[in-house]
Image: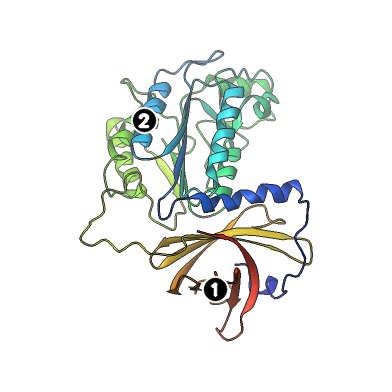
């Protein structure tokens, strides 16, 4: 739901035959309805670049990415994996990954290889990058912000893990090419624009990580050791990884992370306790909606059941750059109607009534006056 001030107008505009390209992109939100009932959909992009053509090669990233990819697949992730990718191949892998993101409960991006920071922004380096001119940064590398933007806009929870702070001769080359470029060591600090995101670095911002002497880097080795532990939240996993890497490198490397997660996420949720398990709720699990407004805006989104007592709402209007997520407590539910409550809105508490039979969604601030806001397009 949006703020109360934007919801008072009842939509009467009929559906338009044509939508702008921006609105067509928003239709991706409706893909949430294809998620199996109560089954989390978890996706990942894993890239390892080591066989560089124009700078120092790295022996471990391919192994790191291969092993992380295999482990994520074992843990139930739908994985897009790439090894020793040039610029065209990295673009293609990112495009494939972006198409899997809509409605994903958890999206993971793991990158091992060369990267650099320029003017406070981070760039991932394909194996064919030369960086012979200062403008090549924009054309020959992949902006981390591009990956981050796709994940934040489309997935419910996002996890980015960067084992990419190796000593990079390309960064030194760039410093010699132009005094106008601020080329730093390691990677720059980045925290994302919203919530439900965790970004992990193999070492602290501005520092250089070690490639390692064994099959895997110290960071990937610790991650592989701990990510399979049943029942550990990701934040617990990364704390164990930090301790292992710090000890293994004699204090020379300490992994770093930024965390704005609101819910617990897991690599390995573990087997549920069947004795204490809550019976699976019946009825609709995902409810998709849309609405056309008198000012020409179109809103698309969905309500998704988290468990027997909670729902998540994902909503985006055509004039907004990214989707917004809200959490609701279920007050009651039948096959025909669901009543939800959100007491954490900045505009005050709000109740939502989902009338499945009438295919309409209403909101109220007092449970006496109900305002029609969205048309249900699918309930499943």
Q: Give the class, few, some or many, for how many residues have Cα within 10 Å of label 2's Cα (few <14, many ≥20).
A: some
Q: Residue at x 55, y 54 (%)?
A: 194
Q: Quick check: 42 left or right of 272? A: right
Which circle marks residue 352 in the picture? 1
Q: Residue at x 67, y 21 (%)?
A: 177
Give the x, y percent position of residue 58.
44, 18
27 over 339 or under it: above or below: above
Which circle marks residue 70 in the picture? 2
Front one among 206 and 12: 12
Question: What whole-number distance in Å separates the C-alpha atoms at marks 1 and 2?
Answer: 42 Å
| Figure disc tally | 2
Please state which of the two labelled residues, at mark 1 or mark 2, is closer to the viewer.
1
279 over 194 or under it: above or below: below
Question: For residue 374, what is the image quadrant?
Answer: bottom right
**Helix, strand or loop at disc 2?**
helix
Give the x, y percent position of residue 288.
57, 59
Q: Give the class, few, some or many, for how many residues have Cα within 10 Å of label 1's Cα (few <14, many ≥20).
A: many
Q: Is residue 160 visible?
A: no
Mark 2 and mark 1 in contact (Cβ < 8 Å)?
Answer: no
Residue at the left extreme?
A: 275
Give the x, y percent position of residue 165.
47, 30
């Amino acid at each position: 739901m949006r703020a109360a001030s934007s919801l008072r107008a009842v939509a009467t505009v009929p559906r338009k035959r044509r939508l702008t390209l921006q609105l067509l992109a928003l239709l991706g939100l409706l893909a949430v309805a294809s998620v199996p009932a109560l089954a989390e959909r978890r996706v990942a992009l894993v890239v390892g670049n080591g066989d560089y053509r124009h700078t120092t090669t790295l022996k471990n990233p391919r192994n790191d990415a291969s092993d992380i990819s295999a482990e994520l697949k074992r843990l139930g992730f739908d994985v897009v994996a790439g090894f020793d990718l040039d610029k065209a191949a990295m673009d293609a892998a990112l495009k494939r990954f972006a198409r899997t993101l809509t409605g994903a409960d958890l999206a993971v991006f793991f990158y091992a290889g060369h990267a650099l920071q320029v003017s406070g922004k981070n760039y991932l380096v394909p194996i064919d990058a030369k960086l012979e001119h200062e403008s090549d940064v924009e054309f020959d590398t992949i902006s981390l912000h591009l990956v981050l933007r796709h994940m934040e806009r489309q997935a419910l929870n996002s996890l980015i893990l960067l084992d990419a702070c190796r000593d990079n001769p390309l960064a030194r080359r760039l410093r010699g090419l132009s005094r106008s470029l601020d080329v730093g060591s390691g990677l720059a600090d980045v925290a994302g624009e919203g919530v439900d995101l965790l970004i992990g670095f193999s070492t602290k911002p501005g520092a250089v990580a070690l490639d390692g002497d064994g099959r895997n880097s110290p960071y990937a080795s610790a991650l592989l050791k701990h990510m399979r532990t049943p029942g550990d939240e990701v934040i617990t996993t990364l704390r164990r990884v930090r301790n292992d890497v710090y000890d293994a490198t004699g204090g020379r490397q300490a992994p770093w992370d930024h965390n704005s997660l609101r819910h617990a996420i897991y690599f390995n949720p573990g087997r549920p306790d069947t004795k204490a398990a809550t019976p699976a709720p019946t009825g609709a699990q995902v409810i998709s909606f849309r609405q056309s407004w008198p000012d020409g805006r179109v809103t698309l989104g969905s309500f998704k059941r988290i468990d027997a007592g909670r729902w998540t709402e994902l909503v985006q209007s055509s004039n907004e750059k990214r989707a917004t997520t809200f959490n609701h407590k279920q007050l009651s539910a039948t096959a025909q109607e669901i009543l939800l409550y959100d007491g954490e809105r900045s505009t005050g508490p709000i109740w939502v009534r989902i009338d499945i039979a009438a295919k309409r969604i209403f909101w109220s601030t007092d449970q006496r006056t109900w305002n029609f806001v969205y048309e249900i397009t699918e309930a499943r």
